[in-house]
Every structure is written in structure tokens, then in C-alpha cells.
Image (spheres, rainbow, N blue to C red):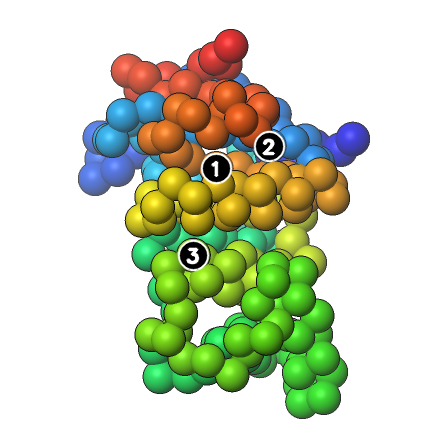
Amino acid sequence: MSELIKYEGVELHQAEQIVLRDVNLTINTGEFVYLLGKVGSGKSTFMKSLYGELPIAAGKAQVLDYDMSKIRRRKLPYLRRRIGIVFQDYQLLTDRSVEDNLIFVLRATGWKNKRIMHDHVLEILQQVGMDKKAYKMPYQLSGGEQQRVVIARSLLNSPEIILADEPTGNLDPETGNEIMELLYSISRAGIGVVLSTHNLLWPEKYPGRKLLFEGGLISESK
């Protein structure tokens, strides 16, 4: 088991205000980690710091083999290729099919061969149960189907970490359960999953580490 994320004495700011302080934690391969806490407690701030959207204000922060306190902007795309991000609001391109949404990402990350891209996209869509709907437009899909496509998109470049920000927030309980099952199976395959949620039933059903965000601090929760 190797370290994916290591924060030591980290401080994070938003608009010059301290949001999180004295963050000390390590996340390893294959761990399923919940971020729990009220709105505004710093969960999204922490996630943004993991892929370089938000700078490290103080302390030592290592994500994969990148020093996040010193990382240069031109290195961020290389880091982000190794991290899959699952958004609550999907952020799919509405003017193109499911397959073309994923091809767009592959092209943006340096893939060139059309046949290889097509085969890779169908293989990833099969993993999330969406290979039969590769030709569909996003508006023709249910919320759960769109979220499956988003998860497929996050898996395209064989990430070592998946960051999922409230991935079931817009879904009914049954569909949310299917998405959680899918993410949980991804972690069992050895990918670290960091998931923020307000649904306290998920940690009971899908056990994992629980990090509680409260009062500007992060603590381990039982």
C-alpha cells in the first residue's frame, strides 16, 4: 500500500480567510475516504487543494509525487491526468454524444489515434454499464446515467485517485445506491476514492475512513 496524499501542518485559505488549519493526514491506495461536515466546513476547499485549484498557504502537501506547495502551473495538467474528478452537476458537454464527450477528454490529454480512442471509450463505458448508450446525447439520459458517464470520464486516463464531490446529491436513493456501489467497486480495484457527502447512511452501508470537517479542523471520525 503506497501513499497517494500526505498533508502535514497544512493551512488552506479562501479569499484570504483561513478555512482549514493544521491538516495532518495520509491517504493510501485503495482507501475509500468520506469527507463529512456541514456546508462551508471546508470539504470542497480541501478537494480543490488536491488538484491544484487552490494553493497551499502553509505546511507540506504531497499529492501523488507532486509537492503541492511548490508545484508550477505548467505541471498541473500532468497531475490532473492522474486524478479523476466526479462532479455533482455532471458538467457534460450538451452538444455532443456520450462517446464524443469522452473522446473530447482523450484528445485534450494527448490521445490521437481514432480507432484506439473509440475502443478505449467503449471499454470504459462497459465498466460503468453505459456502452449501449454511447450514441446518446446527455439530455436523453437520466441523472443516474449521466453520473455513470461522469465516472467513466474520470476513469479514462487510469487515475490513481478519484475525487467525488457529492456524487449522489442530485439522485434518488435507489440510483444513488447504484452510483455508490460503482465507486466502491472502483476502490476495491486499488484506486483511492475521496468522497464528500451529506448522506450519513452511505458510511454505514459502504464502510470506509471518515474525516470530519468542523471548526476549521479535520479529524478522524469513528
Residue under circle 1? 195
Rounded to the nearest whole Å, what is the CA distance between mark 2 and mark 1?
Answer: 8 Å
Decide: marks 1, 3 in contact (CB < 8 A)? no
Residue 219: % across, % down: 45, 14
Element type at mark 1:
strand
Foreground disc of the pair 1, 3: 3
Residue drawn at x 35%, y 37% as measured from the top left: 45
Left or right of residue 22, residue 18 in this image: left
**Location of mark 3 (residue):** 144
Secondary structure under the numbered disc 2 in the rendered image: strand
Image point 70% across, 74% down: which residue?
A: 120
- Camera sees residue 130: yes
Q: Nearer the viewer, residue 68 or 170?
A: 170
Q: Residue visible at 57% across and 42% down? A: 181
> N-terminal of the two: label 2 or label 3?
2
Measured as percent of width and height from the top left, residue 95 is found at 35, 84
Mark in the foreground, 2 or 3: 3
Q: Is residue 30 above or below residue 160?
A: above
Quadrant housing residue 20: top left
Distance Cα–Cα, label 2 vs label 3: 21 Å
Please tell me which residue lies in front, 73 or 219. Answer: 219
View extreme (right): residue: 1
What type is the residue that disc 3 sits on? Gly
Residue tagged 2: 32
Screen quadrant of the N terminus: top right
Packing grade of label 2 (10 A; few <14, some 14-19, many >=20) is many
Asked if disc 2 and disc 1 are in contact, CB closer than 8 Å, the reply is: yes
What residue is rendered at 36% in x and 21% in y?
213
Choose the circle earlier in sequence order: 1 or 3.
3
